Image: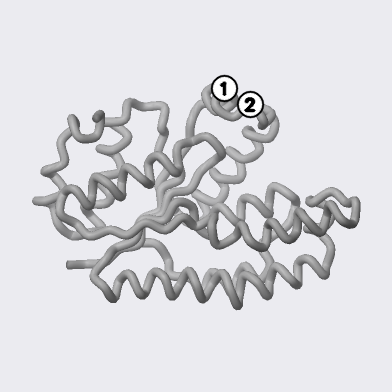
Amino acid sequence: MKKILLTLSGTHGSGKSTNAGKCYYLLNRSGYKFSYIRHQDLLDPFGFIVRRTARILHLEPNRLEKMKPTRVAWSIYLLFIYCPILVGGIKLRNLFGYSVVSDRYLYDVMVGFRDNGMTVPSENLLMRLLPRPDISFVLDAPEQRILADRPEHSGAFIRKEKILYRQVADHFNLSRISTSDPPSIVWSNMLSEIKVALGERTSVEQITLQQVIG
């Protein structure tokens, strides 16, 4: 059976984790073998170090991020820790017969850095080293719903994120999905593309709308 890499990206509050978990659950329930990667776990350790250092130096984290020593440190971390763990984790899962669902991917890192007016350190090299997903969904949701779920963010922040994600989606030809639709419609839209990547139909079509809604 073909092994694929499926990634879900999108703004804060758009339903990335919810839909990644649903894809993982429903595809496994239908007879496919999928493993789950929480991409953010690979970035959090160094992000914590940057925030802690900023506090010690009495600097804003965004300002520290833009300094050359921090960008060099980010580059080293991304190339020698993040990348080998991510690539190795995907290959190991494939070796054991699993496809992969990833909650976020490099596209989200790009948006995060661009939100601070920067590019990802060693971005071009990372794009060559990391596997290109077979399917990448960029999820979107209405601004008011996001703000209701994530009151810590401002409308301006969410609008800027939406613009950046649209730019990334257009540049890399990623599939955009609106999570404002009913769950059954969202899943149906995603499923049609997953079926093409898997090259199979029968077992996936056994996933009913009742399973999705439930």
Quadrant in which the N terminus is drawn: bottom left
Dividing the picture into quarters, in which one does residue 22 lie? top left
Dividing the picture into quarters, in which one does residue 165 lie? top right
Residue drawn at point x = 37 percent, y = 56 percent: 36
Residue drawn at point x = 56 percent, y = 26 percent: 143
Q: Secondary structure at mark 1?
A: helix
Residue 71 placement, left or right of 31: right
Read off the residue under disc 1. Answer: 148
Residue drawn at point x = 35 percent, y = 62 percent: 5
Answer above or below: position of 156 versus 171: above
Residue drawn at point x = 15 percent, y = 36 percent: 208
Answer above or below: position of 120 versus 146: below
In the depicted view, which residue is nearer to us: 16 or 168?
Answer: 16
Give the residue type at disc 1.
Answer: Ala
Give the residue type at disc 2.
Answer: Pro
Q: Secondary structure at mark 2?
A: loop
Residue 49 placement, left or right of 175: right
User: Could you tell me residue 32's position as x and y percent?
Assistant: 19, 57
User: Could you tell me residue 40's position as x and y percent?
Assistant: 54, 55
Read off the residue under disc 2. Answer: 151
In the depicted view, which residue is nearer to us: 177 or 9?
Answer: 9
Residue that sits furthest to the right in the current view: 58
State yes or no: discs 2 and 1 in contact (Cβ < 8 Å). Answer: yes
Answer above or below: position of 68 versus 110: below
Residue 113 placement, left or right of 16: right
Badge 2 crowding class, 10 Å Cα cut-off, few under 14, some 14 to 19, many 20 or more, is few
In the depicted view, which residue is nearer to us: 195 or 8?
Answer: 8
The colour scheme is one colour
